[in-house]
Each structure stands twice: as structure tokens, then as C-alpha cells.
Amino acid sequence: MIDDPYFYLAAIPAVLIVGISKGGMGGGLGILAVPIMALVIHPFQAAAIMLPILCVMDLVGMWSFRGSYDKTNLKIVLPAAILGITFAALTYQYLSEAHIKLMVGMIAAGFTINYWYRKIRKVPEKITTPDPVTGGFWGMLAGFTSFSVHAGGPPINIYLLPQKLNKTLFVGTTVVFFTVVNYVKLIPYTMLGLLNYSNLTTSLALIGLAPVGVYLGIYLHHRINEFWFYLLCYSLLFVTGIKLIYEGALGLQ
């Protein structure tokens, strides 16, 4: 188990942030966890430590948002995400973390800038509906990026946010999506040796924070109206996009 106190100074707030995001603040906030932990350990080790914790959080989220999900969207994005995970696992040794972060960051930031531009110019907002082609693309990209750096939030949000789902339905759909994605990821993570004894025992030391963060997110979720909820979602999507662009550009130097 990691015994470096500086690691826990980074890991404890990182785990709580992910829990808050999964508990109802579905705007990509949880994507900050791996970069925070990567300040003191290797990013891939950070991702491996986070995965069992994410799985516990997902169970709490599933119970809290039980029955609140969009079945049509899940039928589209889940098979695509599993394909994305499979492709990421097969190309794991060739993946550049910097390139993945840069790609996801540019997509997230660009999508949000376009949304705000249309708001400022008062362009009529087009509310989308579930679409197999669009959902398949973003679902596959979410699975691919989730495998590498747990960065599946921006792609799936880009697909779901324009549908203007009820906020509880939106969060419940993302909870089911990431529960399936994270449990599927356990298979390739184990086969690749990422879930070793050191990482698992470190996860166990932090896992008690999982329900604390999730329930804090649920508390906040029920106290924010839909206007502010979606404003926060798009703002967090933009912030995480810029963060990923910075991390990716830094990694390419």
C-alpha cells in the first residue's frame, strides 16, 4: 500500500470530488481526480487505484437514482462504449496519454464554446433526440477515453446535454452508463496487471470516502434548479476541457 502522506493529501480530495460528481453534479467534475493524483504518482497507477473506488461509488449511485434512466439512450451508447473499451485495451501499450487528453479536451472545450456562442447570439437552441449514429460515436469515444484516464464524462455529456433531459433522468442515465463501463473495465485492467496488490490495498484505504462523496453530491443535486444545474454542467465541461488541453500539451513537450 502507498504510504506517502503527500499521496493522501492529493487522493482524499480527489476521491471526494469524484463522489460529488457521481452523486448528481454530472458535468465532468470527476475527471479531475486522475490529474490531481497524478501530481504524486504515475497517471496509469492513479487510474488503477481509482477504478475499484469508482465501482463502489457506482453502486451507491445506482441505488440513489434507481429507476431514473433513459433506456433508449442506454441501448445506443452502452454497446458502443464496450467497443471503445475493447479497442483501448487492445491498443493500451501504444496509447499516448497526452494525445488522449488533448483530443478529449479540445472536443469538450469546443463544444462548450459553441453552446455559449449560440446563447450570446441568441441562436435558437436545437434540442436533440436519441440518435444511433451520434450516440454510437460519442459512446465509443467515451468508452475509449474512460479506459485510459477515466475521462468518459465529456464525450457522453456532449451527446446527452443537448437533449435537455430532466436533471434527475440525466444523472441517472450517466450513473447507469458508467456503472456498466467501470465494471467492464475491471476485466482488461486485471488482465493487464494494473489491479495489483499495492494498488488494490491503496484503493481499500480510500474506499470509505466513496459513499461520503456520493451522498454529498446527492444533497447538492436536490438543491439546485435545472437552469443552474445545466449552467454548472456546461461550465464544468469547459473547465475540464481546458484542464485536459493543458495536461495534453504539457505531455507532448
Image (cartoon, helix red, strand yellow):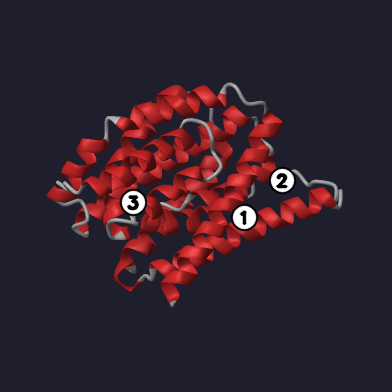
- The amino acid type of the residue labelled 3 equals Met
Quote the CA–CA distance across marks 3 and 2: 36 Å
Contact between labelled residues 2 and 1, with CB atoms less than 8 Å apart:
yes
Q: Is residue 70 among the parts visible in the rendering?
A: no
Q: Looking at the picture, does residue 4 appear above or below residue 61?
A: below
The residue shown at (62%, 26%) is 224
Quote the CA–CA distance across marks 1 and 2: 10 Å
Residue 199 spot, x, y in % from top left: 19, 49
| Sooner in the amino-acid sequence: mark 3 or mark 1 | 3
- The amino acid type of the residue labelled 1 equals Thr
Find numbered disc 3 in the image and state the secondary structure of the residue it sits on: helix
Q: Nearer the viewer, mark 3 or mark 2?
A: 3
The residue at which mark 3 appears reads as: 37
Residue 44 spot, x, y in % from top left: 30, 59
Residue 210 spot, x, y in % from top left: 34, 32
Q: Quadrant of residue 223?
A: top right
The residue at which mark 1 appears reads as: 134
- Label 1 crowd bin: few (<14), some (14–19), many (20+), radius 10 Å: few
Residue 131 spot, x, y in % from top left: 64, 49
The residue shown at (48%, 29%) is 217
The residue shown at (30%, 53%) is 46
Q: Is residue 198 left or right of residue 78?
A: left
- The amino acid type of the residue labelled 2 equals Thr
| Sooner in the amino-acid sequence: mark 3 or mark 2 | 3
Front-lying residue, 165 or 79: 165
Residue 172: give its label: none
The residue at which mark 2 appears reads as: 128
